[in-house]
Image: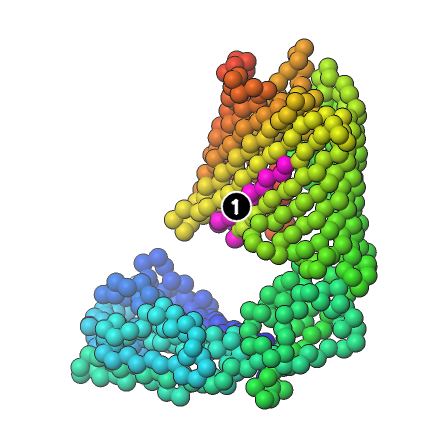
Amino acid sequence: MTKIRYKRILNFTKLCARKNLYMLCLPIFVLCACSSDGKPQKISSLDDPVTFYLTGVDRYDVKTNILLYLNELPVISKQRARLYSREIIEKIQQASHAYGYYHTKVELEYPKKDDEKDLQIKVKVDLGKPLFVRNCDISVIGDGAEYQSFSKIIKSSGIRSYSILDHGKYKKLKEDLKTRALELGLFDAKFSISRIIVYEEQNAADIEILFDTGSRYMFGSLEANDETKELMKPSSPLFKLYEGTNFSSKAVNDYISAMSQTNYYRSIDIRPLAEKKQNNKVPVYIDLQRQTNNLFRVGAGYSTDENFRGILGWDKPLINEKGHSFSSFIRASSVKIDAQAVYKIPRTDPNLDYYYIKLAQTHTDYNDTLSDLSHASIHYVAKKTGSIIRDYYLSAEYEDYKQGIDKDYVVSVMPGILLSKRSSTGGLVPKTGYSISLDTKFSSKIVSDYNFVHSELNIKGVFSLFESRNRILYRFTQGGNFGSDAIKAPASLRFFAGGDQNLRGFSYKSQSNREAGLLSGSRYITSGSVEYNFPIPFENMLGAVFLDSAVYTNDYKEIKPLYGPGIGLRYTTSYGVLKVDVAYGIDNHRKENNLKLHLTFGPEF
């Protein structure tokens, strides 16, 4: 059997267990409903079905297990309740044994015969003292004995001498050991000894486990059809499952993940053929289906900043066997229209080491900004070493703009580097995560119209509090134009405050230095935000309170901070997060206050 099939068998076993539990629980939901005080409410065609009222058990998990066992019993009528005494007591004892209580005493008080409304069996349980593990002998032999992961599993199981006997932990430990063995390619692993010896009179138990992992298998030959072998050529640098190296399910999963990231393939099937293992090697089966030659994207969105916007995209994920690809889009809103085309050329690794050429055209008409920007750049992206993504580029831009009373056309040839790092967990509403980017580009009169350096640092992050849905989100931006001609930088490289991504409480890019009463853009900007998300009693919704702040200036000797406190709601869908924010903009310098509503929809982080 293959490794993947081993995992499927384990998953199937767990599924069966869940389904068996479902079948156990089915009578509970069909025949009864448990009230908050722990009393199962029987629903039956009988005129006098009894229910159970359980007392004397403080441990929630033990109490829940006892109720689950009791509801395996058939519906009991009041008249026949005493006939089930033995079965009731046995069920309670079985449920208690699972948590190490082998001296459980049970007292039953039956419904009063002369009271027609009394349909309750009062169950008083004295769990007694739990059994303690006296001797605990857990050993791993074979090739697996060399790996610390098995020791960590044993240590984290909570099973040790002088601990309370728990059959659930014992079962989970065995499952975890077996699963880890399969992940490491120890396909012949088995339990030579696995037993719990109970000494009720001594209130003790001994646990013995001897796990023989056998020998670790290695990757064997590759089995793939001719079409798959051809499709593997564009992603050949990603292949790491070399024959003769130790088998690892992590290596298989990492390979699948890397192949998926290329977007070259519509279907990826990679699995070891464990049924064909021999000479301590296991062959690897690979089947790939090529991605569609042309992919089209159509989308629409809305934000208070840009109102309604739409996007139309066209991609060619795999052009040739060298892994070249092409992507493009045109996006339009009432504020901005931009089109972009990118041609990607892998150098070695198509995910971590590649070149790309970018062409873009942007038209902006908003507030006091009117700009037409043409852009062309060539990039080299390096991610193979370290955790920081490095994007080295050379860009050429021509911008014809009018910014307030300033009108010009500028040619800029700029080498630059974009450094970025990102990590997040939790999907659309991440529990933890962060992203950091620093983009710096240089313009010189040797090849451009002006001398300046443009740099922008962006930091975003989120972390959860108390293992709950309470979260803190933060954001910080520091941007600046430096050099002798920094004040003459084109409009697209000047800084503005305001908007749902910058300073809520103010309209989109509505705040900057002014000249003759019109926005002129600023040389520098410093902005930050802190937001607290908390659960509210509505499904998929969170409340939010936040404080935004920003400073724009041409000289930090003149600091005029703006503030944007507010409240909001977050509604999570399978397509993104809908944000509704109401913010109060405070400008102490201009003596102006604004109340703004911001609506956004899309990925949160």
What type of secondary structure mainly makes up the magenta span? Answer: strand
Residue at (36%, 76%) from the top-left corner?
A: 170
Q: Is residue 40 found left or right of 556 in the rendered image? A: left
**Quadrant housing residue 151:** bottom left
The residue sitting at 64% across, 15% down in the picture is: 514
For the question of whether residue 526 can be seen, the reply is: yes
Which residue, given by chain and number where applicable, does mark 1 sit on? 434
Q: Residue at x 76, y 54 (%)?
A: 345
| Mark 1: amino acid | Tyr
Q: Quadrant of residue 50?
A: bottom left
- Judging depth in this view, the residue of 282 and 487 nearest the camera is 487
- The residue most toward the left is 202
Magenta run includes residue 278 = no
Give the residue at x 31% y 63%.
Answer: 60
Structural crowding at the residue carrying mark 1, measured as other residues with C-alpha within 10 Å and reported as few (<14), some (14–19) or many (≥20) = some
State left or right for residue 279 relative to residue 532: right
Relative placement, left or right, of 36 versus 524 is: left
Which segment did they paint magenta? 425-440
